[in-house]
Image (spheres, helix red, strand yellow):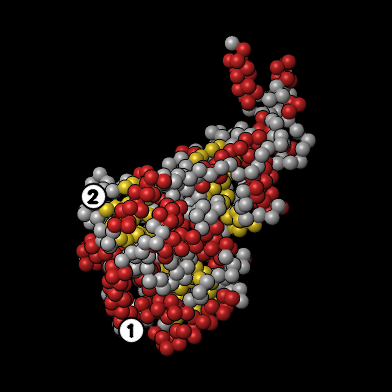
Amino acid sequence: TTKTTKCLISQALLFFCFPSQTETKSSRYGGERVAEVLQAHGVKFVFTLVGGHISPILVACEKIGIRIVDTRHEATAVFAADAVARLSGTIGVAAVTAGPGLTNTVTAVKNAQMAESPVLLIGGAAATLLQGRGALQDIDQMSLFKPLCKFCASVRTVREIVPVLRKALAIAQSGTPGPVFVEFPIDTLYPFHLVEREFAAKGSPKGLVGNAIVPPQSPEKPFCWAWEPRILSPLPVRIPHATDHQVQQCAELVSRAKKPVILLGSQATLPPTPVDHIRTALESMGIPCFLGGMARGMLGRDSPLHIRQNRRDALKEADLVVLAGTVCDFRMNYGRVLNRRSKIIAVNRDKKQLLKNTDMFWKPTIAIQGDAGSFLLRLSKGLAGHRCPEDWLQSLKEGDITKERANRAKAVEKTEQHLNPLNVLHHVEDLMDEDSIIVADGGDFVGSAAYILRPRGPLCWLDPGAFGTLGVGGGFALGAKLCRPQSEVWIIYGDGSLGFSVAEFDTFTRHKTPVIALVGNDACWSQISREQVPILGSNVACGLAFTDYHIVADGYGGKGILIGREDEASLDEIIRKAQQEAQQGKAMLLNVLIGKTNFRQGSISV
């Protein structure tokens, strides 16, 4: 039929193009198209480790005012993009070169997937003409990232750049946010005259057909219709929401509850609902809250609604539990901590996460696939005038005070050697600026910090999330300081986790991002050793050394300070000095020699 014929012709024109449609004299290049799309989507930073495959993107972005921030490891670039996504409510962008540049990002991309962070990973690739022919760093990159990303695409022509990127950016932020990957073969990014010089076949095409069309294996093919005007603006972002009927049902359950609690997870901080509005909604309902992940700090430093201790006991006693973005995985003992007699309202954008382990350990009374933040706003409106019973809140708060008083007493105990880590952390807590952001990267020491350090407000805490990845510290702190240059950014490191990103002190120095790193140096992978030694009777592979990390920071252009037992009386003075140095532009590393305590740490992501 005529319709079928037209369709076949259209498809053929995508495969072949006429020479008159290829602007061989243009000095423009595909990297410019990438930069234009990013600018139209409000991207302010691109994190990278430079490589020839992606140079045109970096150069074009810099020319139009997008800041290029180069790191010392590709994983750091993705972690930094992840932090920007979480703190800014927009997309985070990392660009890395082909082959090993991309494989170095795999852990960071998986972490972004599990943390539900909208990150765009841009990857270089071998030229379309040379893929599969043994070109430098040519591997099947798509197969690596399809299991990790919501969307993967390999751009084959300059003309495809704009629509593919717009689609990728919308998908990353829609539904349950997550990473997306777009691969750019090198011949889609550089100017035509350079591509032709490198890849053109020797000899001229022969015959009528040879002269009339450009065959698929030609350097001209990626440039067909390359510079046609394209729409650059963002596509709509689609977010699931609870229905009015579901919100009304939940309001009725909450209004009848005598002992309700809310468990907030990281999803509650996602756009489009401003976190300050969520905080107001929670305060209006007056329901006791346990905060986890990115939701730490949602209620400020000293809210009477924020319950920090004895969560398991509270859940056993509660008659209604609202899981607002909280998932019943290992952090909730797979749902077994929930009282089977409790009414349970679960809200999550992701259906699999919403119903995780409901086949075994728990059952929701109402399960809503929707945005947790907007749900809480609508729930508070439906409960206008209703407040949680004060005696329930007061009983939980009293338990909090008793537990924290006992923990504080442990901080003044002397350790066999070096400093008591709990005492050090209490000093930091007392002196940390009210506009601070805390980045958690470690095990034992960071687990203690999670009990002691209190985020000052919403979006002031960054941890890896459910994947429990070590090595996020350098990248998260870099992204945080760039997003909020006036804020004091603290990285809480274990001495083990520091090894993954200590080289980023060079990045902090070059890019003028003066963070403060607090390193709990006990010369051990202590979180592992605590269980390995009593169970298996050996400390093998757990021992480290009391390394001079402060000197390493000096070598990278920062400033390091060694703190030992002899400095205990002057801890406040040393911390204030570090804060002052950071304000003056110096990245600081406090290498604190700590001893062992019997303080029991938990997961930082609960």
Q: Residue at x 46, y 73 (%)?
A: 518
Q: Position of residue 17 (x, y in %)?
A: 68, 25
Is residue 523 among what the camera can see? no
Question: Is 551 situated left or right of 450 in this image?
Answer: right
Of marks 2 and 1, which one's residue comes earlier in the chain?
2
Outermost residue toward the front in this view: 385
* Of the pair 299 and 382, the residue shown nearer to us: 382
Q: Which three-letter amino acid code belongs to the residue tagged 1?
A: Val
* Residue contact between numbered discs 2 and 1, judged by CB atoms under 8 Å: no
Considering only vertical position in the picture, is 96 above or below 310?
above
Q: Which three-letter amino acid code belongs to the residue tagged 2?
A: Phe
Considering only vertical position in the picture, is 547 above or below 295?
below
Outermost residue toward the top in this view: 1
Quadrant of the image containing the C terminus: bottom left
Secondary structure state at the residue bearing disc 1: loop
Q: Residues within 10 Å of mark 2 (few under 14, many from 20)?
A: some
Question: Is 7 situated left or right of 535 in this image?
Answer: right
* Of the pair 481 and 542, the residue shown nearer to us: 481
Q: Position of residue 588 (x, y in %)?
A: 53, 74
Residue designated by label 2: 361
Q: Residues within 10 Å of mark 1 (few under 14, many from 20)?
A: few
The numbered mark at residue 385 is none
Question: Is 331 situated left or right of 79 in this image?
Answer: left
Q: Residue at x 25, y 58 (%)?
A: 319
